[in-house]
Image (cartoon, grey):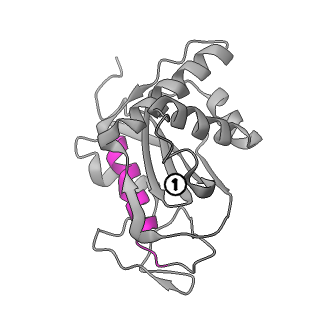
Amino acid sequence: MKKIITLLLAILTTNLSISQKNNFSELGLEQSIFDVFVNYANETKDTVFNIKRSDVVDKACFHHNRFLGNIPNEPDKFLICHHESKKIGKYDYVGSDTILKHYFDRLSFYDTKKEYIPLSEILFLGTNPNNYIFENPNTTNNIIAKHILKSFLDSKEHKEIIHMFNYDYIGIDVMFHKNFYTVVIMFADDNIIGNNIIK
């Protein structure tokens, strides 16, 4: 049985502006990250990485990324956590979305057909000093995706998770907060009981 994993990597910097948060789905950035991610895995794993994107798992990732963006923070820090509640430390959640405490709950909320089993959620907080990547007119989605993956792989624990299993599905969401960007990645497998896959 595959182990359930929760990993968190936070790199703190300064000059956060929640008001400048944007989601990159319209730019196709998440798709670029997915392509770069799979290409890397296939170049470095012993077996072919046949992971697929899932709109349902994407929605669970987007839900939590939006939750993180609706926690008012001090100017010099950004709170990043796996759980959701009306209060995180001394900060009150100011959004209007349904509070879904655990990533299991988030995937279950959107997975109305019970097609998936959640395996892990990874949160990544990266830095973008002086907007040098996002505001460069020569920057492409592929360059941004490679930048995020490189930052991701600088963590030994995050790198190992790619090589640990042959996951069935992945969800990705990226949000930009001026000098920060947050990435939520979730891995899931087929719910073989729910889908009646067992022969």
Tell whether position 59 is magenta.
yes
Q: Position of residue 97 (x, y in %)?
A: 29, 68
Tell whether position 131 is magenta.
no
Q: Position of residue 98 (x, y in %)?
A: 29, 68
Q: Which residue is mark 1?
A: 182
For residue 49, side relative to residue 193 (left or right): right
Secondary element under disc 1, as helix, strand or loop, is strand
The quadrant the C terminus occupies is: top left
Q: Position of residue 14 (x, y in %)?
A: 64, 69
What residue sits 32% from the left and 48% below the top? 59
What residue sits 50% from the left and 61% below the top? 178
The quadrant where residue 9 appears = bottom right
Prevailing secondary structure of the magenta residues: helix
The crowd level at tag 1 (other Cα within 10 Å; few <14, some 14-19, many 20+) is many
Judge whether 125 appears above or below 19 on screen. Answer: above
| Residue 91 in view in this figure | yes
The image shows a total of numbered marks equal to 1
Nearer to us in this view, 71 or 110: 71
| Residue 107 in view in this figure | no
Instruction: Give the residue furthest to the front.
Output: 137
The quadrant the N terminus occupies is: top right
The quadrant where residue 197 appears = top left
Instruction: Give the residue furthest to the bottom.
Output: 90
For residue 71, side relative to residue 5 (left or right): left
User: What segment carries the magenta color?
Assistant: 57-72
For residue 188, side relative to residue 149 (left or right): left
What residue sits 34% from the left and 32% below the top? 193
Instruction: Give the residue furthest to the left.
Output: 113
Nearer to us in this view, 64 or 72: 72
What residue sits 28% from the left and 27% below the top? 196
Q: Position of residue 167 (x, y in %)?
A: 51, 28
The amino acid sitting under disc 1 is Thr
